[in-house]
């Protein structure tokens, strides 16, 4: 009886409450931002739904219990992620990106930093935002590259008791905040020992909201996730106290990579959610539409088999994601491998399955009158963000496989 994929009564309760919240509140995100022209206007239009999510206690769930939150682990997070993402990606990603911004503080923050930066996320009011600012103009797949690679270009130097940060970042979720004055906390990846080889000098510095010198260049107008903010911004002589360094000087690479490990498993689940939304739509379409013929199109074998293939990939991605989350919760040695596999498989399955389901529905799926075009726009982000599958995630998996100590049964827990 050790392998059991059924949910506990508490998890089932969580699933149903997340499903209800998504149907009641998150379903309003699309209509609220539909006709707004700029990324910032669309982002701001999502704020009431985001505030509702905070009030309902979903934000507190992001924060693990040892830090005062209600977080009960990755599987529970996966359950909420699937229910939310199947209805709206925008507010959902804004919420989940906080996890990326806060994880360096969970992992390596001092008690004082944890107290200062986590507390806004424990309240049942407001609209707190946290961001991990790693990506830079010119690329970040090689953020820790040794010389002569540039690696991370943003630099911080000590002046008296202050860090002074200069550089530029882009694609950073929610980084410039609701009003352009910054997220509540920005975990900035930078080089603190610029003349040295980049890989030994990467650090993370917490920049609180309202710090002078965060200048928006522009808000990127992305293909999908249209109500989620990903600005390009400069850090111009941003000054923060020396004590805002998270972890040791030069210890940032490990923290960045650790922060992205947890989110990898959840990106696989985001793919599951988008496949689920597309599948439910396509199945109903196939059962009800005759397209001028005699029978509903599901009676055509080609259509039925395409639906069968789509559902098979969806289920496979869900259980790989759950397994990865379970391994992470257990701190099992196979966790990082499984998280990467969940990210790569779930994200790429989503793009291919939704594309195939568009063929099932046919040409009408190509219009925004039906939901599949929008779901594909959102799905295309999944292999690209949270560390691109080409430049980051397969490379990390390759690194695991190359290790002399690697055992192929570790991921299954049967070594
Ligand atoms: C909606 C959204 C939200 C995001 N949120 C955040 C966030 O909160 N914080 C943040 O920091 N970033 C964020 N990003 C950026 C995201 O995490 C990217 O995955 C990250 O910037 C890395 O991009 P990349 O892999 O394309 O790297 P790039 O450096 O731009 O590489 C581009 C391409 O070059 C090739 N390449 C480069 N180096 C190698 C190599 N060594 N080996 C093999 N191929 C290589 C690959 O083909 C790769 O795809 C977000 C992006 C989006 C779309």
Image: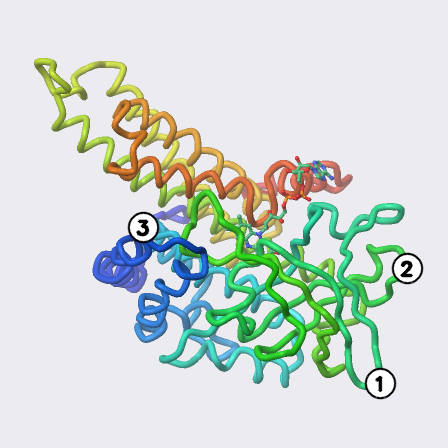
Q: Nearer the viewer, residue 291 or 211?
A: 211
Q: Is residue 295 left or right of residue 89?
A: left
Mark found first going from the N terminus, 3 or 1: 3
Q: Which mark is residue 333?
A: none
Residue drawn 61% across the image and 59% down it: 217
From the viewer's perspective, is residue 110 above or below residue 402? below
Q: Are marks 3 and 1 in contact (CB under 8 Å)?
A: no
Q: Are marks 2 and 1 in contact (CB under 8 Å)?
A: no
Task: Tell me the CA gap for discs 3 and 1.
Answer: 56 Å
Residue drawn 43% across the image and 49% down it: 225
Q: Position of residue 333 (x, y in %)?
A: 62, 51
Q: Nearer the viewer, residue 285 or 9?
A: 285
Q: How packed is label 1: few (under 14 Cα within 10 Å), some, or many (20 or more)? A: few
Q: Please identify, in this view, whether the residue under mark 3 or under mark 2 is nearer the observer.
A: 2
Can you say which quadrant of the picture contains the C terminus? top right
Q: Which residue is mark 1?
A: 160
Q: How packed is label 2: few (under 14 Cα within 10 Å), some, or many (20 or more)? A: few
* Observer able to see residue 132: yes
Residue drawn 57% across the image and 44% down it: 340
Q: Position of residue 127 (x, y in %)?
A: 41, 74
Question: Can you tell which quarter of the image residue 41 is in?
Answer: bottom left
Q: Which residue is mark 3?
A: 6
Residue drawn 32% across the image and 22% down it: 359
Q: Please identify, in this view, whether the residue under mark 2 or under mark 1 is nearer the observer.
A: 1
Q: Which residue is mark 2?
A: 196
């Amino acid at each position: 009886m050790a392998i059991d994929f059924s949910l506990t009564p508490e998890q089932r309760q969580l699933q149903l409450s997340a499903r209800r919240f998504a149907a009641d509140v998150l379903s309003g995100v699309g209509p609220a931002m539909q006709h707004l022209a700029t990324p910032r206007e669309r982002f701001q239009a999502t704020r009431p739904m985001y505030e509702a999510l905070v009030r309902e206690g979903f934000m507190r769930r992001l924060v693990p219990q040892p830090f005062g939150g209600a977080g009960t682990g990755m599987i529970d997070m996966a359950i909420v992620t699937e229910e939310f993402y199947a209805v709206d990606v925008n507010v959902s990603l804004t919420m989940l990106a906080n996890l990326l911004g806060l994880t360096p503080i969970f992992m390596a923050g001092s008690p004082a930093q944890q107290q200062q930066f986590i507390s806004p996320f424990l309240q049942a009011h407001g609209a707190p935002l946290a961001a991990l600012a790693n990506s830079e103009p010119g690329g970040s797949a090689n953020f820790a590259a040794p010389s002569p690679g540039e690696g991370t270009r943003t630099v911080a130097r000590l002046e008296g008791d202050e860090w002074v940060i200069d550089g530029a970042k882009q694609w950073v979720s929610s980084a410039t905040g609701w009003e352009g004055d910054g997220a509540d906390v920005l975990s900035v990846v930078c080089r603190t020992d610029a003349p040295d080889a980049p890989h030994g000098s990467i650090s993370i510095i917490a920049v609180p909201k309202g710090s002078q010198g965060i200048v928006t260049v522009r808000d990127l107008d992305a293909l999908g996730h249209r109500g989620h903010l990903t600005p390009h911004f400069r850090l111009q002589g941003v000054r923060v106290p020396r004590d805002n360094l998270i972890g040791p000087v030069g210890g940032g690479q490990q923290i960045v990579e650790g922060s992205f490990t947890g989110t990898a498993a959840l990106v696989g689940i985001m793919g599951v959610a988008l496949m689920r939304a597309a599948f439910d739509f396509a199945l109903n379409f196939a059962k009800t539409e005759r397209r001028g013929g005699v029978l509903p199109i599901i009676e055509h074998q080609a259509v039925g088999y395409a639906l069968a293939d789509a559902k098979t990939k969806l289920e496979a991605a869900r259980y790989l994601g759950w397994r990865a989350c379970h391994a992470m919760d257990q701190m099992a040695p196979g966790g990082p491998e499984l998280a990467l596999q969940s990210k790569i498989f779930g994200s790429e399955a989503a793009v291919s399955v939704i594309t195939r389901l568009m063929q099932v529905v046919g040409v009408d799926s190509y219009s925004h009158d039906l939901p599949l075009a929008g779901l594909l726009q959102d799905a295309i982000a999944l292999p690209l963000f949270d560390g691109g599958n080409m430049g980051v995630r397969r490379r990390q998996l390759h690194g695991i496989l190359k290790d002399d100590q690697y055992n192929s049964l570790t991921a299954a827990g049967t070594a």
